[in-house]
Image (cartoon, coloured by chain):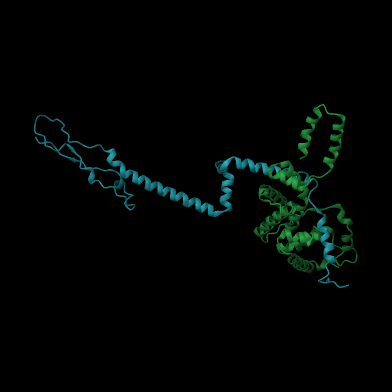
């Protein structure tokens, strides 16, 4: 897309263009650069094997896909492998993508299925490899309130809390962990989660309620 | 204040889960992510282009597939045994056909020992090959005489 425009530019400039035409090129350039290419266009080009277009799709969704897999596995290396494999699988399966849902939902579904299969193979052999907390964690109002003096376990630090939280997450079943991850961590709506998990909204709500109850029981020492 | 949170009030839990949003991969991780995906896609395409036999020659992957699926190793062993058995049977049948072609017809031989009467029978009399029966029975297969064309020779001395 972008490369096509860049490639055509020297040809335009080589022609004896009028000042009016040159202005038209100058005006169109910033618009083309600032406006994001629609997802459908990128998908159309990627289906033809255009890796530049697919790169752009990967860059758009890499953080969310990685984060979902990471929160499911609590392991950075596994999340890295699975996220890459999900995008590779999606690229090879692009021809079967009918466009019934957004590319985003479709690739999410691939990543989720791949992760659940991986977790079933891994069974209970959980080996956590946690990402570091960013600098903003110490200033997050929710967390500040949680580790304030009113908290029963106020001596706990954020790293320990992070570990306990991940342990509690790993005690949930895959489907319950996924609902908590998508809703409470990533902020997806019930409708979006239902599409990704291919189930109805009622199922999503009931799973979320049960998962929260379980988590609350596991983490009762750390909650007000 | 109660130590046990209200089971239907998840505000505390949701605050705690906010911590998960602050977990971040190493700095610069996403800068190279798309490139790594692209490299792996291109590597896969190259491997697919090189064909089945080229991949078969990739011994590391070949043995890894045996490790991953032991049933493949079993199937490979059965196939090797079947191949060996077919080879044995085929070679046995080939030997069955060979003796008639290999041994030339033996004519009566007169060695020309003077003008004296020489019996009709030759010095080296070879019995008819029809009497030679090759036994395909695998039980007798171990004995070399069962498949080698051993031909008894009657040695007749000329009369004085």
- The colour chain B appears in is cyan
Q: Nearer the viewer, residue A41 or B103?
A: A41
Task: Look at the image and tell me in which quarter the C terminus of chain B lies.
Answer: top left
A192 in relation to B124, above or below? below
- The extreme bottom residue here reads B2
- Residue at figure coordinates x 57%, y 43% from the top left: B55
**Against B146, is A22 above or below?**
above
- Examine the rendering and report whether any part of residue A181 can be seen: no
Going 44% across and 50% down the picture, which residue do you hit?
Answer: B81
Answer left or right for B89 relative to A81: left
Please determine whether, in this image, residue B118 is positioned above or below residue B38.
Answer: above
Rendered-image quadrant of the N terminus of chain B: bottom right
Chain A colour in the picture: green
The image quadrant of residue B49 is: top right
Residue B68 locus on image (x, y percent): 59, 53
User: What number of labels is visible?
Assistant: 0
Q: Residue at x 87, y 32 (%)?
A: A20
| Residue closer to the observer: B56 or B113 | B56
**Residue farthest to the right?**
A149
Using the rendered image of the protein, determine whether residue B19 is visible from the camera's viewpoint.
Answer: yes
- Picture coordinates of residue A68 (x, y %)? 75, 55
């Amino acid at each position: 897309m972008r490369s096509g425009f860049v490639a055509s530019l020297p040809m335009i400039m080589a022609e004896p263009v009028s000042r009016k035409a040159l202005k038209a090129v100058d005006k169109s350039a910033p618009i083309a650069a600032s406006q994001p290419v629609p997802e459908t266009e990128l998908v159309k080009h990627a289906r033809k094997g255009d890796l530049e277009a697919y790169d752009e799709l990967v860059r758009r969704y890499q953080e969310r896909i990685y984060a979902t897999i990471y929160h499911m596995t609590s392991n950075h290396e596994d999340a890295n492998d699975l996220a890459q494999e999900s995008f590779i699988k999606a690229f090879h399966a692009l021809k079967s993508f009918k466009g019934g849902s957004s590319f985003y939902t479709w690739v999410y579904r691939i990543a989720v299925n791949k992760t659940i299969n991986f977790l079933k193979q891994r069974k209970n052999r959980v080996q956590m490899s946690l990402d570091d907390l960013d600098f903003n964690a110490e200033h997050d109002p929710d967390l500040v309130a949680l580790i304030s003096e009113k908290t029963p376990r106020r001596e706990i630090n954020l790293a320990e809390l992070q570990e306990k939280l991940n342990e509690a997450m790993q005690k949930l079943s895959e489907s319950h962990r996924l609902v908590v991850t998508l809703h409470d961590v990533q902020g997806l709506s019930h409708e979006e989660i239902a599409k990704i998990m291919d189930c109805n909204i009622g199922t999503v709500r009931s799973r979320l309620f049960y998962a929260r109850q379980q988590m609350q029981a596991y983490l009762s020492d750390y909650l007000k | 204040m109660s130590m046990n949170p209200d089971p239907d009030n998840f505000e505390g839990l949701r605050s705690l889960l906010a911590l998960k949003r602050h977990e971040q991969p190493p700095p610069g991780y996403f800068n190279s992510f798309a490139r790594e995906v692209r490299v792996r896609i291109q590597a896969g395409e190259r491997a697919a282009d090189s064909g089945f036999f080229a991949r078969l020659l990739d011994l590391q992957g070949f043995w890894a597939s045996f490790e991953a699926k032991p049933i493949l190793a079993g199937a490979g062993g059965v196939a090797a045994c079947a191949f060996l058995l077919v080879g044995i049977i085929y070679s046995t049948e080939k030997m069955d056909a060979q003796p008639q072609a290999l041994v030339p017809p033996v004519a009566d031989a007169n060695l020309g020992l003077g003008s004296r009467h020489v019996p009709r029978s030759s010095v080296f009399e070879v019995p008819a090959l029809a009497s030679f029966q090759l036994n395909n029975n695998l039980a007798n297969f171990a004995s070399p005489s069962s498949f080698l064309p051993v031909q008894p020779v009657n040695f007749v001395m000329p009369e004085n």
